[in-house]
């Protein structure tokens, strides 16, 4: 009888459990329906960098939209069937555009288009500038891009949504909307002594800048800045005439803004002109800055890893004057650098605020806390990166590599216009700034060159080259911010997932510095022995007599034995370094791939065993 009661009791509990499960399913369904109805498109973004949350900059741009803007998302269904990964990307873009529409109060109109092959819709898509993407080997193509228009026939196009630009998606969309909503594009006057468009080919960084700004080359000699120029971009301004320097001085004092790129050594342009006089330094001092043309910034913490040939063998080392600046080196509070991922520099100079300056100097880019200046002449003579790394003595402070200059100041030409300037300019001469300065000064010109930020195009690859650093974004942020387009800043390089392992990098650098010191010691001894071996037979012997005495032969054999031992020791030191680095990398791989799953599996095993033991203990 008792067994029957226990069976009935278990049956009742089973039915109750089934009823509870059914009730939970109904409750979950009701909650989902309620959430979809009441909460709409609200989402909870728990990612560290808020990858799926629209920035305040986008919200400001949408608030400024006065007239309807039509965005047509073009996506071919055949393309999605051929490349399923694009379906997910398309869904993200569609949802993001719908969020734009909702935040703009309907002023941004979103439309989806799937153009059939050989149709009028496909003709319109091609006429707008979209590029076809191959779907199959038969030659069929699909489309995945955006066409934006405004009420005055303005046109903005994204020819292809490239997956490698997914982290720039919000910026690409917001920039198009901003340009459609803005009537006038700022004009940038470019004064440069470098061939930015030499040989009929413009540097790719300038192509990026030209997407949102009008670039107007002014040459290297101007008597006055044209009135339609909104801001200046000065690239390697060395050897400028007094009249040109005066024109820049008066433009800045009158409220004009400028992006200035200096460099103690332009590595990417062979034969680039170098400063031979104080020239531009005169303006820098008036702005409260000092720049030494004979020093370059070195840094262990942000040194870039390079490969070079040593004794015919490929060798990896840290180049302490080629710097890869990450978030720790960028000012997170300035709209120009906030949100950028990586900025690469090559042999950058050092900026120093002057004592007693009336301007405010805010660093934008800087080295790590162990930066130290190096003699630029070592690089001009072709210094060995291994030697630079081995001999580098860390400093005790961060060096300023780029800075924003704001505030009031006086002219650099206190006695009036220099000779050669139109005398009528004296009547409009400004002794002090009529409006607060707003300048950005960078101690490197190489950052604009594609070799520092753009991957080379592979042969037969139709996709656009991918950027591996934010150099062009930094320059565009700077110009757009100076031009008053601050609404677009903060949108670039959102959601970069790669993060350097600073602790492991420090361990690797310390190990390599120890290796390089030992290597240099052994190599010096080996070189001395080679000299000794080469001269031993000939020393103290008559011409043509190649016979060695027993003592000389013993000395020669001992020298050869020592040379063989030194070579063996050198190989052992190199092998020890490689083994140590391999152990570090293996530990990282294990932690990333196996350790966490193993820990989770062990925890789940403990939980399952504990629950089973609890059930067995409670069983009658």
Image: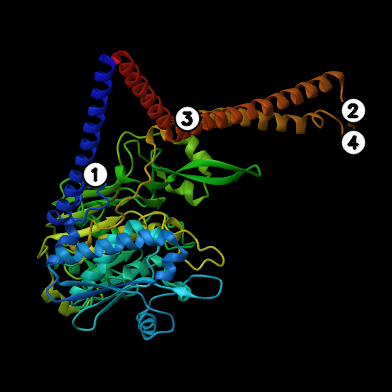
The spot of residue 513 in percent (x, y) is 49, 31
Label 3 neighbour load within 10 Å: few <14, some 14-19, many 20+: few
Front-lying residue, 457 or 34: 34
Looking at the image, residue 450 sits to the left or right of residue 417; the answer is right
* Residue 262 appears in the rendering: no
Q: Secondary structure at mark 2?
A: loop
Residue wearing tag 1: 46
**Gap in angstroms between the C-alphas marked 2 and 1:** 83 Å
Decide which of tag 2 and tag 1 comes sooner along the chain.
1
Extreme residue in the front direction = 1
Q: Earlier in the sequence, mark 1 or mark 4?
A: 1
Mark 4 residue element: loop
> What residue is disc 3 on?
587
Q: Along the polypeptide, which appears first: circle 1 or circle 3?
A: 1
Instruction: Return the mark for residue 544.
Output: 4
CA gap, disc 3 and disc 4: 61 Å
User: Closer to us: mark 1 or mark 3?
Assistant: 1
Quarter holding the C terminus?
A: top left
* Cα–Cα span, label 1 and label 3: 28 Å
Mark 1 and mark 3 in contact? Answer it, CB < 8 Å: no
Q: Label for residue 194?
A: none
Describe the element under mark 1 as helix, strand or loop: loop
Of marks 2 and 4, the one in the foreground: 2
Q: Nearer the viewer, residue 520 or 57?
A: 57
Q: Mark 4, residues whose alpha carbon is within 10 Å: few (<14), some, or many (≥20)?
A: few
Q: Position of residue 490 (x, y in %)?
A: 23, 56
Q: CA separation, marks 2 and 3?
A: 58 Å
Q: Which residue is mark 2?
A: 547
Disc 2 and disc 3 in contact, CB within 8 angstroms: no
Residue sitting at x 19%, y 69%: 251
Could you say where residue 149 lies in the image, as x and y percent from the top left? 24, 78
């Amino acid at each position: 009888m008792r067994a029957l009661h226990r069976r009935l009791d278990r049956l009742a509990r089973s039915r109750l459990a089934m009823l509870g499960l059914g009730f939970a399913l109904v409750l979950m369904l009701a909650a989902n329906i309620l959430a979809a109805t009441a909460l709409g498109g609200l989402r909870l973004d728990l990612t560290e960098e808020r990858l799926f949350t629209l920035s305040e900059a986008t919200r400001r741009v949408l608030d400024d939209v006065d007239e309807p803007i039509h965005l047509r998302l073009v996506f071919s269904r055949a393309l999605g069937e051929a490349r399923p990964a694009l379906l997910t990307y398309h869904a993200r873009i569609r949802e993001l555009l719908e969020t734009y529409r909702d935040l703009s109060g309907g002023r941004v109109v979103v439309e989806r288009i799937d153009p059939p092959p050989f149709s009028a819709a496909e003709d319109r898509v091609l006429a707008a500038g979209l590029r076809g993407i191959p779907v199959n080997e038969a030659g069929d193509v699909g489309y995945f891009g955006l066409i934006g228009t405004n009420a005055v026939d303005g046109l903005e196009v994204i020819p292809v949504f490239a997956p490698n630009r997914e982290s720039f998606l919000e910026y690409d969309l917001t920039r198009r909307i901003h340009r459609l909503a803005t009537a006038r594009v700022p004009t940038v006057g470019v004064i440069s002594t470098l061939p930015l468009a030499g040989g009929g080919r413009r540097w790719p960084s300038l192509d990026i800048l030209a997407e949102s700004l009008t670039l107007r080359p002014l040459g290297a000699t101007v008597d006055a800045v044209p009135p339609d120029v909104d801001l200046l971009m000065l690239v390697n301004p060395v050897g400028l005439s007094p009249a040109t320097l005066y024109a820049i001085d008066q433009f800045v004092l009158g409220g004009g803004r400028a992006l200035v790129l200096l460099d103690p050594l332009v590595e990417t342009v062979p034969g680039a002109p170098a400063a031979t006089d104080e020239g531009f330094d005169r303006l820098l001092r008036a702005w409260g800055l000092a720049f030494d043309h004979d020093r370059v910034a070195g840094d262990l913490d942000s040194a870039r890893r390079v490969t070079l040939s040593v004794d015919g063998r490929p060798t990896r080392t840290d180049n302490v004057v080629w710097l890869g600046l990450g978030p720790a080196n960028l000012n997170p509070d300035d709209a120009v650098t906030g949100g950028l991922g990586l900025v690469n520099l090559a042999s950058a100079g050092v900026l120093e605020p002057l004592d007693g300056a009336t301007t405010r100097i805010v660093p934008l880019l800087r080295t790590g806390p162990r930066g130290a200046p190096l003699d630029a002449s070592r690089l001009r003579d072709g210094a060995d990166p291994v030697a630079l790394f081995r001999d580098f003595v860390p400093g005790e402070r961060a060096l300023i590599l780029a800075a924003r200059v704001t505030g009031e100041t006086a002219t650099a030409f206190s006695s009036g216009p220099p000779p050669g300037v139109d005398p009528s300019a004296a009547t409009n001469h400004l002794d002090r700034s009529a409006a607060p300065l707003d300048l950005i000064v960078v101690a490197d010109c190489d950052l604009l060159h594609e070799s520092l930020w753009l991957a080379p195009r592979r042969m037969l690859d139709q996709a656009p080259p991918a950027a591996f650093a934010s150099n062009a974004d930094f320059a565009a942020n700077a110009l757009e911010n100076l031009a008053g387009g601050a609404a677009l800043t903060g949108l670039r390089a959102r959601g970069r997932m790669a993060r350097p392992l600073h602790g492991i990098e420090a361990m690797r650098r310390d190990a390599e510095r120890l290796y390089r010191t030992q290597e240099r010691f052994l190599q010096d001894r080996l070189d001395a022995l080679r000299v000794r071996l080469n001269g031993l037979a000939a020393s103290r012997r008559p011409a043509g007599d190649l016979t060695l005495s027993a003592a000389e032969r013993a000395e020669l054999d001992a020298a050869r034995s020592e040379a063989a031992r030194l070579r063996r020791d050198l190989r052992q030191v190199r092998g020890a370094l490689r083994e140590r680095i391999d152990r570090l990398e293996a530990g990282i791989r294990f932690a990333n791939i196996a350790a966490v799953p193993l820990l989770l599996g062990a925890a789940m095993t403990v939980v399952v065993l504990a629950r089973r033991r609890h059930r067995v203990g409670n069983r009658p």
